Amino acid sequence: MKIATWNVNSIRTRLEQVIDWLNQNPVDVLCLQETKVMDSDFPRSPFEELGYHLYLSGQKAYNGVALISRQPLLDVSTGFTSIVPTIPPEWDEQKRVITGVIDSIRIVNLYVPNGAAVGTEKYVYKLRWLTVLKEYLRSLLQLQPAICVCGDFNIALEAKDIHEQVSLNNHIMASEAERQALRDILALGFADAFRKFTQEGGNYSWWDYRAAAFRRNLGWRIDHHYLTPVLYERAKSCIIDVAPRKLPQPSDHTPVVVELE
């Protein structure tokens, strides 16, 4: 089974690129972030013509996540409160979480808040959101041992996940508080699928549009697949496909694909 995660930075803008990529890479499940469209306006038919089933949680112009699967998914839900009713509903106002089950594997597709800048209200919101995520995942682990949590985490966990020209002193997506929040989540029982196969730095999934960052490979690895032990053992590969980032007017992110036995 192949599961891909891709922040497409507007599905309507990148629709042709996503469909072309699926034709060349017919993954079992494609997890999209930043779809930036209401569910009623999502371009469903091109995916359905390829035989995919769509599960959506979108909003106008911002955020938005989608699961696109070759098989129908089971137990699909959106947001935090569908799993943990005690979580205040305001944490689901931004459409950032969707989950479903395929072949006894629960896939959790996330778009973690960016946080804007260290010390801002958006940064505080991000840290609190990660605390809510931890509670949500803890509850899911009580129900399902095989979980793949993937998406745009907007956090580079290690120094080697960032090109060396970036200063790490209180830099958003690399501050110690963000990294510790993610480490606390992983301590529930998740491991980085990409690092099972690739230890060296220089491998990135996001490059700023400015300063010729992609051409110069001035990137960050912030798009991840985190697996519970039973899936980590089954992981055969995890690759970053840079090809879509080379296209005209691409997303600033590129797909990351994990393959499970």
Image (cartoon, rainbow, N blue to C red):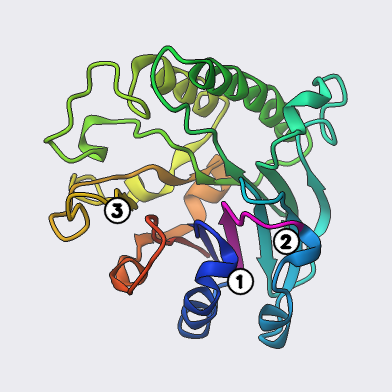
Name the one closer to the observer, 41 or 192: 41
Q: Give neighbour class at mark 3: few <14, some 14-19, many 20+ (Cα, 10 Å).
A: few
Q: Give neighbour class at mark 1: few <14, some 14-19, many 20+ (Cα, 10 Å).
A: some
Residue depicted at x 73% and y 81%: 45
Residue 41, picture quadrant? bottom right
Q: Which residues are magenta?
A: 29-38
Percent coordinates x, y for residue 253 in the rendering:
39, 55
The residue wearing badge 1 is 28
> Residue 85 magenta-drawn?
no
- Mark 3 and mark 1 lie on one chain; the one further toward the N terminus is 1
Report the amino acid beneath label 3: Tyr
**Does residue 20 show up?**
yes
Percent coordinates x, y for residue 255 in the rendering:
43, 62
Residue depicted at x 41% and y 14%: 177
Report the amino acid beneath label 1: Asp
The residue wearing badge 3 is 209
The local secondary structure at tag 1 comes to loop
